[in-house]
Amino acid sequence: MGLGGILFILVVLICLILFIVAIVKTARMWGALHIVLLCILFIQIWVFLIFTAGVQHERVRATKEAATQTERAKRVTAETNRLRFGSIDAPVDSLEAVVPVQARLERLTIDRGRVWRQLRFEGQQDNRIQLTLAAPSAKADATDGQPPAAAPATSGASLPANLVVYGFAEELDSEGQPLPVYYLGEYRVVDSAATGGRITIESTLPIHPLHQARIAQGLDGWTLYELLPIDSHVAFAAPGSEPSDEAIFGRMDEEAIQQLLAGVPESVMSAYLRDGQRASEDDRPEMIWEQVSLLKDHQETVDSGQNADATISGYFDPQGLSVDLRLKRHGQVELSPSDVRDNRIVVIESAARDWISKGIAERVQRLFVRPLNDYLGLFNRKYATAFELQERVKYYQYQNQLMEQATQTAQEMLAKRQQEKQLLSSDISHYQTEITALELAVTAAQSDLEKLKTDLSRLYQAIQQYHQQLISSGS
């Protein structure tokens, strides 16, 4: 028993003794009924006093507990708001808060469409690949202690025939989560089973040898995207890095970029590493943006008069105005210095010059911003270029084969001509001998001819003399 209990008992004993003394001294003046009533009243007073003390004790304890819980609730509410929305005093959105992270995740995944993860590879036949969807996991009912419900049957209804999807190879990270790490090409759903989750996809183009080699190596799983993820400035930023004046998109993850872009030209890798940093004098004009500080409120038109879906004609028209209904603001966008952090905003150089000339803003710094890539178009052009190169290789191989055949024919003809030359060389030696003999014969014949001419001339002259003599003797 504590000191308070001992003191309480002493007070009760003293009061009881005093009450007995008072009763004894006044018993002669009071009757028995008065004494009994007085004793009952004394007992009731002490009973009520004990009850009151108990109530007061509980009230004090409850009040202290309520105050403690109120302070705790305030701290928990503040911590909940901090974890949910972040700190209002922070210069940038905290990546540890739910709402900023969720908003950033939504911005990163707004245009990827549906995603199917952890598909199991079953086999391949030419350009067709068989996959199996991951089975849904069953969840136990923790409220009533019942055994877990049976998992729903896997269905391929979400992958109808002729749906075009984009395949990625999965790898498990350190936490066992599947992450897409390697592009495997564009495919079309050929068949999807209503039950069992078996689907067959066919490559829309001949499977690239690099993709085929990656498939043959074996994969942890497949991820299928309804829309091919688009390029982004922040996608290559280091995890946890925050935008700053030196890097408006955050610090670029140099290690990841060098790993992903291994083998590309140095100029391309440099563009990814310098994205969002200060521009240099050697940078091309189309890669220079301006960071300006707003001086007054401004309204800007961002919607195009056209309405279309991003899968048909893209998100923006040639002037940069949004055509996708999901991006339209349905009116002019109002820019106010009070609504922009540090009154600063990054715009293209042409818009910055216009704003500066109108006194809407002033220049802060020039920035290098790499143009975003249309990876689907790049992949298609890559396939077209590869196909063209293959066709050219086949053409030149055919031409080379013709040249080899022509060379072989020429060599055969040369061998025949050399044989003919040898025969002609032999013939010409005989011919030259014959010519020499003929020349000698001709010379001899000419000599005989000259001699014959001389003899004939002599005979002719002799005949002429005889003729003259005959004429003379006849006369």
Image (tube, grey):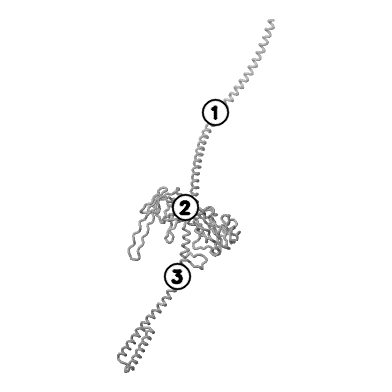
Quarter of the rendering containing residue 30: bottom left
Q: Residues within 10 Å of mark 2 (few under 14, many from 20)?
A: few
Q: SS class of the residue under badge 1? A: helix
Which residue is located at x 69 percent, y 7 percent?
Answer: 472
Q: Amino acid at mark 2?
A: Thr
Q: Amino acid at mark 3?
A: Thr
Q: Which residue is mark 3?
A: 77
Judging depth in this view, the residue of 311 and 232 nearest the camera is 311
The image position of residue 58, as x and y in percent, is 38, 79
Image quadrant in which the N terminus is located = bottom left
Judging depth in this view, the residue of 54 and 123 nearest the camera is 54
Eye-nearest disc, 3 or 1: 3
Q: Which residue is mark 1?
A: 427
Quarter of the rendering containing residue 437: top right
CA gap between label 1 and label 2 equals: 83 Å
CA gap between label 2 and label 3 equals: 43 Å
The image position of residue 94, as x and y in percent, is 49, 65
Which residue is located at x 44 percent, y 60 percent?
Answer: 173
Q: SS class of the residue under badge 2? A: helix
Sequence-earlier tag: 1 or 2: 2
The image position of residue 116, as x and y in percent, is 42, 56
Q: Are marks 2 and 3 in contact (CB under 8 Å)?
A: no
Question: What number is the disc on residue 311?
Answer: 2
Q: Are marks 1 and 2 in contact (CB under 8 Å)?
A: no
Quarter of the rendering containing residue 360: bottom right
Q: SS class of the residue under badge 3? A: helix
Judging depth in this view, the residue of 235 and 252 nearest the camera is 235
CA gap between label 3 and label 1 equals: 118 Å
Residue 41 seen in the figure? yes
Above or below for 29 versus 334: below
